[in-house]
Amino acid sequence: MSMNLATRMSRLGTETAFEVLARAKALEAQGKKVVHLEIGEPDFDTPENIVEAAVKALRSGSTHYGPSAGLPHARAAFAEWFSKDRGVPVTPEQIVITPGAKPIIYFTVTALVEAGDEVIYPNPGFPIYESMINFAGGKAVALPLREENGFSFDPDELRRLANDKTKLIILNTPGNPCGGVLSPADLEVVAEVAREHDCWVLSDEIYSKIIYDGEHHSMLEIDGMAERTIVLEGHSKTYAMTGWRLGYGVMPESLAPSIARLQTNSTSCTASFTQEAGVEALMGDQSAAQAMVKEFKARRDLVVGLLNEVPGVSCLTPGGAFYVFPNIKQLGVPVEEFARTLLDEYGVAALAGTSFGSYGDGYLRFSYANSQENLKEGVARLKEYAQTLV
């Protein structure tokens, strides 16, 4: 039979990191040594106390369905941790626990955005934002993050982009792919715009604990924003739990039942033993997570220094997450071609900045969630390629 997919499928994007990873694995299968700087995943194992909590939960029978919004004691623990960490009061009823953090993006856009509604999102930014807006039939409105602004946004540009059709503003701090960190002043501007146009804010704070310079600030710290903000959080990055699939949203109590109902209709619930591991991650020993951040900072400093020694390449120092976003415009090669050649001929897997939106043109994204030895090797191979172009 013919493959007659629904029209909406033509509006669904993808995450290029997984496509590049597949190409890199294929090259490795042919015997080529590849330095993996493409995937946004900590190269550390999940801390042992978290693993043991999951094993104990499995052996104690935590293998059954739970409520769609999450196990009551897990929601309480997540709310307690978030309240202390952000300095804002959060109740268990404001928490919806999901299998990974992406469902919070999907559920939020599905619940709030109607055909024709405008959604402002960061560009370059996590590609799933734009994909979900388009899939829902909304109008994706790019908010440029420019190098000259430290990969933050221009407040006046945000004010110009917003209008009475704006239903949602999406933020990401610290950000992927640029590593930019929004200041309290930035957040105040977003709050001003959201109040003026009576719209929602989805604040993706998944990298909140991977920050090197200053402190993380949340939209929920801004007076009056709790009633119109959904914060996306999760365990994948901070606790090296990508494969566990554990995320959650913090939102107004009135919205949580609708988000939970979407989960009922899709994934049913998040695995019970994974939630038990997540409680231990937040409430237990933090030394392993802190050690990871310390190592990420050392890698950041190393890779930024090395990249800035490459002819025709310049790189800002990111304030958070574990990505660098070097500028390769002086090399004179389209970024997609450059990234493809870098992998195929030099064995370095990286992502073209355009994988994160049109404003990523002229940039590459490297994940420094890899060893210092591999980072040195990867930049050395990049330098070898760059020297053929300048």
Image: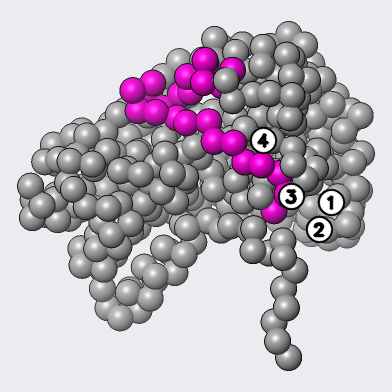
Q: Which residue is mark 2?
A: 267
Q: Is residue 40 magenta?
A: no
Q: Which residue is mark 1?
A: 263
SS at circle 2: loop
Q: Local crowd at mark 4 within 10 Å, few (<14), some, or many (≥20)?
A: many
Q: Earlier in the sequence, mark 3 or mark 4?
A: 4
On screen, residue 103 versus residue 175, left or right, reads: right
Q: Residue at x 44, y 51 (%)?
A: 355
| Marking on residue 136 | 3
* Extent of the magenta region: 135-159
Q: Which sits in the foreground, 94 or 192? A: 192
Give the CA distance from mark 1 to mark 2: 5 Å
Residue type indicated by callout 2:
Thr
Q: Earlier in the sequence, mark 2 or mark 3?
A: 3
Q: Earlier in the sequence, mark 4 or mark 1?
A: 4
Q: Earlier in the sequence, mark 1 or mark 3?
A: 3
Task: Name the spot of residue 40 as percent of width and height, x first.
Answer: 47, 49
Give the CA distance from mark 4 to mark 1: 22 Å
Q: Which tag is nearer the camera, tag 4 or tag 2? A: 4
Residue type indicated by callout 3:
Ala
* Residue 118, quarter of the rendered image: top right
